[in-house]
Image (tube, coloured by chain):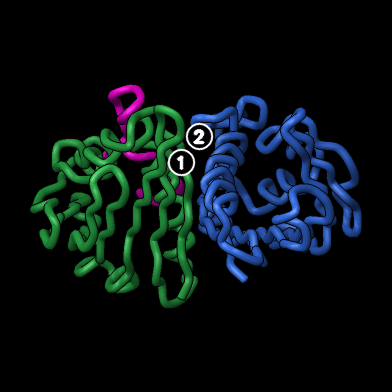
Chain colours: A green, B blue
Amino acid sequence: MVDILHRVGIDASPSDVFQALTTLDRLNAWWTNDTTGDPRIDGVIHFQFGDRGFFDMKVVGLEPGKRVLWEVIAGPGEWIGTEVSWELKPHGDATTIMFKHQGWREPVEFMHHCSTKWATFLLSLKASLETGKGAPFPDDVRISVDAD
Amino acid sequence: MVDILHRVGIDASPSDVFQALTTLDRLNAWWTNDTTGDPRIDGVIHFQFGDRGFFDMKVVGLEPGKRVLWEVIAGPGEWIGTEVSWELKPHGDATTIMFKHQGWREPVEFMHHCSTKWATFLLSLKASLETGKGAPFPDDVRISVDAD
């Protein structure tokens, strides 16, 4: 089992960062602009990326201002059964996010891609909170020579 | 042992990407503007980041247009003995980089930070080749609420 790890500091309170991970209108601002579903505990959030694909995340952990845990229940085969873990740590008036996308079965090429892509979306989350303007799909940062 | 993985596609030939990893003036354009040393096989490249620190990389693998492998021989304790591996794959007229920073002993918090930071420098490398303007230190992308 291998994990994608990232850390980003955001000039916003843990409570604000938690909101950005647990409300549809705030999720829309940094990952994909087509986010629907139920972001409450045991709910399923649907993240749609046009005709490129989607992820369905079951909310399996929520500690306000501290932690969010999603389990991938539908989407690309490599993602199913993996978990996306957000740990929020206060840093003065700001917040440090410790991010893990854990439980990949193999370090496949797609995992390399997703690692880089997660970094760009974490910076989109940071920008959405600090400047009011993130870069969610379909305005996300391109990291390849293909469309994505 | 845990690894940082990334993948980036660059609209430049494998030969141009290889140059950007193996010549001082091109390395200067995307990681740190203070890069010195000997980028030939068995040489040591010194990457200095002002008073924040440095990395010394021994060039332990070079296959023109295909692969570059560095071994970290000085710098932060967590990095020493790890390897930075660049695999270049042709993708039409472009290049896909499969990147690994491998051999971390533990998935410490600093590793999370470095994973995100590597993504920003890979995008700096991409921009340096595609637009002529990267974002090397000290003009690198800030990912935390501290100086780095």
Expressed as whole percent of the image width and height from the top left, the position of residue A127 reads 36, 30
Depth check, front residue: A132 or A142:
A132
Expressed as whole percent of the image width and height from the top left, the position of residue B89 reads 59, 62
Residue A14 is a magenta residue: no
Chain bearing tag 2 is: B
User: For the point 61% across and 34% down, which residue is it?
Assistant: B128
User: For the point 50% across and 34% down, which residue is it?
Assistant: B144
Above or below, B97 against A137 in this view is below
Q: Main secondary structure of the magenta part?
A: loop
Left or right of A57, for residue A78: right
| The quadrant where residue A43 appears | bottom left
Kindly state the secondary structure of the residue where label 1 is placed: strand
Q: Quadrant of the C terminus of chain B?
A: top right
Above or below, B83 against A65 in this view is below
Q: Return the residue found at the far top.
A: A131
Query: What count of labels does the image hold?
Result: 2
Magenta residues span A128-148
Disc 2 packing (10 Å; few <14; some 14–19; many ≥20): many
Expressed as whole percent of the image width and height from the top left, the position of residue A11 reads 40, 28
- Residue assigned mark 1: A8
Depth check, front residue: B17 or B44:
B44
Q: Quadrant of the N terminus of chain B?
A: bottom right
User: For the point 28% across and 38% down, which residue is it?
Assistant: A30
Depth check, front residue: B11 or B111:
B111
Expressed as whole percent of the image width and height from the top left, the position of residue A3 reads 46, 65
On residue B144, which mark appears?
2
Instruction: Inspect this view and state whether residue A139 appears.
Output: no
Q: Are marks 1 and 2 in contact (CB under 8 Å)?
A: yes
Residue A137 is a magenta residue: yes
Q: Please state which amino acid type lies under the numbered disc 1.
A: Val
How far apart in space, not on screen, are marks 1 and 2 (Cα)? 5 Å
Q: Please state which amino acid type lies under the numbered disc 2.
A: Ser
